[in-house]
Image: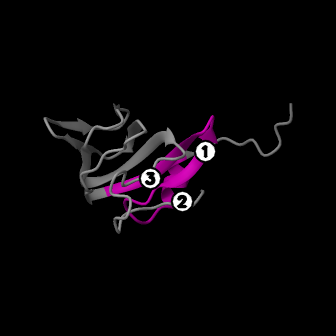
Amino acid sequence: METQGLDKVILKEKFSQIQDHWNPRIVGELNGQQVKLAKFLGPFDWHHHEHEDEFFMVIKGEFELHLRDKVVTLRPGEFMIVPRGVEHKPVANVEAEVLMFEPASTVNTGNLEHSDRTRKDLERL
């Protein structure tokens, strides 16, 4: 089996290349899933994903995941999976570096597919 081009991903280096917020970048792919990184700051929009579950893991900072019936604060080393169809709104009062794992078909704004925050053609780092 060939391993040429197979390199480890150093999250600190990848996050240093991200200068904006709410704009996910692809850092890996496996089995139809994508590993994405983004920096969060401020509130995002309420949305849901009809067909995809979402995995959010905080690497640095923290953010709140607002759900219709509660708010969950995620800190470094913590993750949460939001099942498909569940409305959610990430809010970062301080900058957060977040790793996401989700199907390649997932659009960051879910059912708000035509929002000014929608990112469809994601940059690869």
Instruction: State the separation of the CA atoms marked 3 and 2.
Output: 10 Å
Span highlighted in magenta in the image: 11-40
* Residue type (three-letter) at the residue carrying disc 3: Val
- Residue denoted by label 3: 107
User: Is 33 in front, or is 99?
Assistant: 33
Cβ–Cβ under 8 Å for marks 1 and 2: no
Q: Which quarter of the rendered picture does the N terminus lie within? A: top right
Instruction: State the separation of the CA atoms marked 1 and 2.
Output: 12 Å
Foreground tag (3 vs 2): 3
| 117 sits left or right of 73 in the view | right
Where's residue 119, x and y in %? 45, 61
| 6 sits left or right of 116 in the view | right
| 70 sits left or right of 82 in the view | left
Q: Residue at x 25, y 56 (%)?
A: 45
Cβ–Cβ under 8 Å for marks 1 and 3: no
- Residue denoted by label 2: 122
> In terms of secondary structure, where does tag 3 sit?
loop
User: Is 6 in front, or is 30?
Assistant: 30
Q: Quadrant of residue 69?
A: top left
